């Protein structure tokens, strides 16, 4: 039987559709989309269009971690995912993890497209995979914070040197203020975590380290200045009983980071939305829930001080 004159165009249409399907599938993988926290395949018929941007997928995953309870982290970041989702015209899902390391793993496994990452976590992740800064955050108009070494006011300890042989609370191995800074101080003194203290713990949170000092579970701790200020506002005892015995230079607050392979136009759109959040009422309410003032432009070089500190620590461990 001879082929009819309309069959060739039909074949071209089929080939064209297959090409579009392959492009969509590759973009879904690149953006870390899926309804579950574990990687899932998304049916093409469920794909959505983000405004005037390219089709990306049904769900865009945003990652966050913190020292608070899962309920507190949800309350802090869910308004942000809802706001971004409305502006993009898609669902943005919050994916929580308890530690900074676990959040980094989500990036490496391509299970999230973007997220709020710790300063120390960003520096490590930048070396391992392609990741970019979407925005920095400001609190009280400043994108900086300090690491502070704390002890009880009635303690005879007045310097970091006097914590040698004492007990100490770190926050997380991926925390800049809760681990890198005191580690850097120990390296400068020719010591390390295992030889400087008689005992140490990883509390899992800045607030938990503060309470460990307050409850006399440890002699000292290293936390962020922001966390200490917030804890002192909520608990008068923190302000009246805890002292700062040493503070770091200024560090840059952890950024909102994004996978480098995301489409350039899409990253620009996210930045545009975030940089204008403080200009509308819903955006300001969202920022208030996140405990920040606004988002601002940032660059990798902003973290050179923190990066050099980590280099010195790793060099002491015999790492390159």
Image (spheres, rainbow, N blue to C red):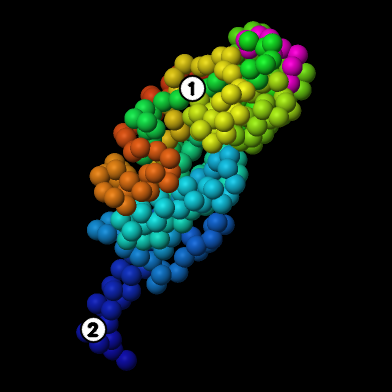
Task: Decide: few, some or many residues near mark 2? Use Cα within 10 Å; few <14, some 14-19, many ≥20.
Answer: few
Q: Residue at x 59, y 28 (%)?
A: 238
**Number of numbered discs overlaid on the protein picture:** 2
Query: Residue 165 magenta-drawn?
Result: yes
Residue, disc 2: 6
Task: Kindly tell me whether residue 310 is visible in this rendering.
Answer: no
Q: Secondary structure at mark 2?
A: loop
Q: Residue 274: x and y, percent?
A: 32, 44
Q: Residue at x 50, y 45 (%)?
A: 64
Q: Nearer the viewer, residue 310 or 239?
A: 239
Q: Nearer the viewer, residue 289 or 16?
A: 289
Q: Quadrant of the N terminus?
A: bottom left
Q: Quadrant of the C terminus?
A: top right
**Which of the 4 image quarters holds residue 44?**
bottom left
Q: Are marks 2 and 1 in contact (CB under 8 Å)?
A: no
Judge left or right: residue 107 versus residue 283.
right
Residues in magenta, as a range: 159-167
Q: Residue 112: x and y, percent?
A: 48, 50
Q: Residue at x 41, y 70 (%)?
A: 46
Q: Residue 199: x and y, percent?
A: 76, 22
| First in residue order: circle 2 vs circle 1 | 2
**Which of the 4 image quarters holds residue 82?**
bottom left
Q: CA distance from mark 2 to mark 1?
A: 71 Å
């Amino acid at each position: 039987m001879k082929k009819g004159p309309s069959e060739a165009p039909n074949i071209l249409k089929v080939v064209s559709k297959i090409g579009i399907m392959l492009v969509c599938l590759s973009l879904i993988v690149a953006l870390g989309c899926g309804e579950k926290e574990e990687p899932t395949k998304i049916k093409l018929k469920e794909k959505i269009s983000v405004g005037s941007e390219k089709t990306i997928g049904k769900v865009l995953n945003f990652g966050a971690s913190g020292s608070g309870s899962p309920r507190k982290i949800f309350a802090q970041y869910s308004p942000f995912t809802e706001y971004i989702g409305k502006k993009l015209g898609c669902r943005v899902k919050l994916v929580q993890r308890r530690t900074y390391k676990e959040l980094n793993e989500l990036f490496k496994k391509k299970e999230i497209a973007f997220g709020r990452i710790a300063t120390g976590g960003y520096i490590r992740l930048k070396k391992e995979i392609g990741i970019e800064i979407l925005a920095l955050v400001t609190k009280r108009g400043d994108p900086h914070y300090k690491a502070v070494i704390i002890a009880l006011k009635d303690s005879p300890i007045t310097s970091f040197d006097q914590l040698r042989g004492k007990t100490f609370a770190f926050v997380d191995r991926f925390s800049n203020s809760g681990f890198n800074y005191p580690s850097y101080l120990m390296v400068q003194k020719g010591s390390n975590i295992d030889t400087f203290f008689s005992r140490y713990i990883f509390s899992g949170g800045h607030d938990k380290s503060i309470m460990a000092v307050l409850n006399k579970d440890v002699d000292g701790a290293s936390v962020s200045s922001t966390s200490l200020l917030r804890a002192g506002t909520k608990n008068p005892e923190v302000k009246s009983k805890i002292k700062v015995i040493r503070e770091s230079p200024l560090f840059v607050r952890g950024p909102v980071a994004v996978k480098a392979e995301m489409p350039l136009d899409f990253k620009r759109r996210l930045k545009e939305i975030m940089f204008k959040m403080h200009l509308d009422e819903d955006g300001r309410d969202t920022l208030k829930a996140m405990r920040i003032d606004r988002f601002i432009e940032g660059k990798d070089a902003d973290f050179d001080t923190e990066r050099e500190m980590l280099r010195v620590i790793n060099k002491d461990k015999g790492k390159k």
